[in-house]
Image (cartoon, rainbow, N blue to C red):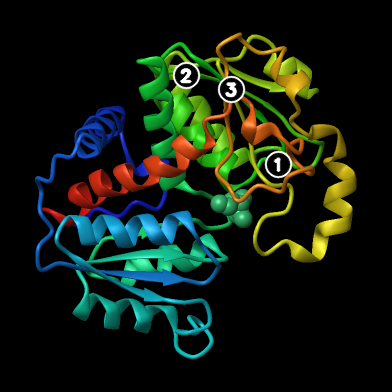
């Protein structure tokens, strides 16, 4: 059976551990699991820097080839049905990496494609980001289980996948979001199920200060995700109390890691110089996208 990765829920704890282990070997320069002769479609409805470049380079460095299809080039669901795009790409490629506005588009792609489909970000989840974030946390802390991750801001795609990844791997998860912008009920339910077997504690905090207190990792993301541009003014107002600044990090553990998936809006969800703070690991996070992508491609493409 093909191995799609549409959600963190498509993985179990053992698989996550193996992906991290393999990514660490890849990072040390091991080039096994060659993808020589294989081809990957990078089908993007939204812009991308890290995800696009890391998948493209991962294929190249493992001996395979990637073809990038830019936003508006294909016109999925407009120029031709998603089901047809899936069946056509399946005839050319060994796998499809897709970034879509709607998660339903990914589900349709996966349903009609005979090759694996990887979620490169949808409105619901960003699993590749969360997996490489686990890699970064593991590298820095030598463990996952028992650590506390505090997310400040929008209960969005990045928060959803991080929440699922944390509860799957036994990390405690706290989140402070404005009312109406919390993690959705469906994702919460899955995370609670994971937590019941992993031992994670989940806390839905009222204030950022409460979430961050003593945390090992403080994480935030943009207030306005791709596709929400019409809500800029309203969101800036609603999220104004959720900026992560140096003094908020001071409430966390002394050796806290500050994380952000990028792109960052300096002076908006983070203070102007936060990325220069010694507690920030955001560029390690960005680099680790490449190593994790390699490990993921080996898992998904080599059957
Ligand atoms: N939440 C952001 C993440 C970008 C990597 C977005 O969807 O635009």
35 versus 210 height, above or below: below
Residue at the disc numbered 1: 154
Separation of residues labelled 3 and 1 (CA atoms): 22 Å
Look at the numbered discs 2 and 1 and tell me whether their residues touch, using CB distance below 8 Å: no
Q: In the structure shown, which secondary structural element does the residue marked by tag 1 occupy?
A: loop
Of discs 3 and 1, which sits in the foreground? 3
Q: In the structure shown, which secondary structural element does the residue marked by tag 3 occupy?
A: loop
Separation of residues labelled 2 and 1 (CA atoms): 20 Å
Q: In the structure shown, which secondary structural element does the residue marked by tag 2 occupy?
A: loop
Residue at the disc numbered 2: 171
Quarter of the rendering containing residue 156: top right
Q: Position of residue 114 (x, y in %)?
A: 22, 69
Q: Earlier in the sequence, mark 2 or mark 1?
A: 1
Q: Residue at x 50, y 64 (%)?
A: 104
Q: Residue at x 49, y 14 (%)?
A: 147
Q: Nearer the viewer, residue 262 or 238?
A: 262
Q: Nearer the viewer, residue 43 or 167?
A: 43
Look at the numbered discs 3 and 1 and tell me whether their residues touch, using CB distance below 8 Å: no
């Amino acid at each position: 059976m093909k191995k799609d990765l549409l959600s963190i829920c498509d993985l179990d704890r053992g698989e996550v551990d193996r992906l991290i282990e393999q990514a660490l070997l890849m990072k040390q320069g091991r080039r096994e699991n060659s993808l020589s002769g294989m081809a990957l479609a990078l089908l993007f409805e939204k812009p991308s820097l890290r995800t696009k470049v890391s998948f493209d380079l991962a294929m190249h460095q493992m001996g395979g080839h990637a073809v990038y299809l830019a936003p508006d080039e294909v016109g999925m669901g407009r120029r031709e049905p998603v089901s047809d795009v899936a069946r056509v790409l399946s005839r050319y490629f060994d796998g499809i990496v897709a970034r879509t506005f709607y998660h339903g588009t990914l589900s349709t792609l996966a349903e009609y494609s005979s090759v694996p489909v990887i979620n490169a970000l949808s409105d619901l989840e960003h699993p590749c980001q969360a997996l490489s974030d686990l890699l970064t946390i593991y590298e820095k802390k030598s463990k996952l289980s028992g650590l506390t991750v505090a997310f400040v801001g929008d209960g969005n795609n990045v928060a959803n996948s991080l929440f699922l990844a944390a509860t799957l791997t036994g990390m405690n998860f706290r989140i402070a979001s404005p009312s109406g912008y919390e993690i959705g009920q469906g994702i919460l339910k899955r995370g609670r199920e994971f937590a019941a077997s992993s031992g994670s504690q989940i806390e839905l905090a009222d204030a950022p200060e409460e979430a961050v207190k003593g945390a090992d990792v403080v994480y935030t993301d943009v207030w306005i995700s791709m596709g929400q541009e019409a809500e800029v003014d309203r969101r800036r107002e609603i999220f104004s109390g959720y900026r992560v600044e140096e003094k908020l990090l001071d409430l966390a553990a002394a050796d806290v890691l500050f994380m952000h998936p990028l792109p960052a809006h300096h002076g908006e969800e983070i203070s102007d110089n936060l990325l220069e703070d010694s507690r920030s690991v955001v560029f390690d996070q960005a680099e680790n996208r490449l190593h994790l992508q390699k490990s993921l491609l080996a898992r998904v493409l080599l059957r």
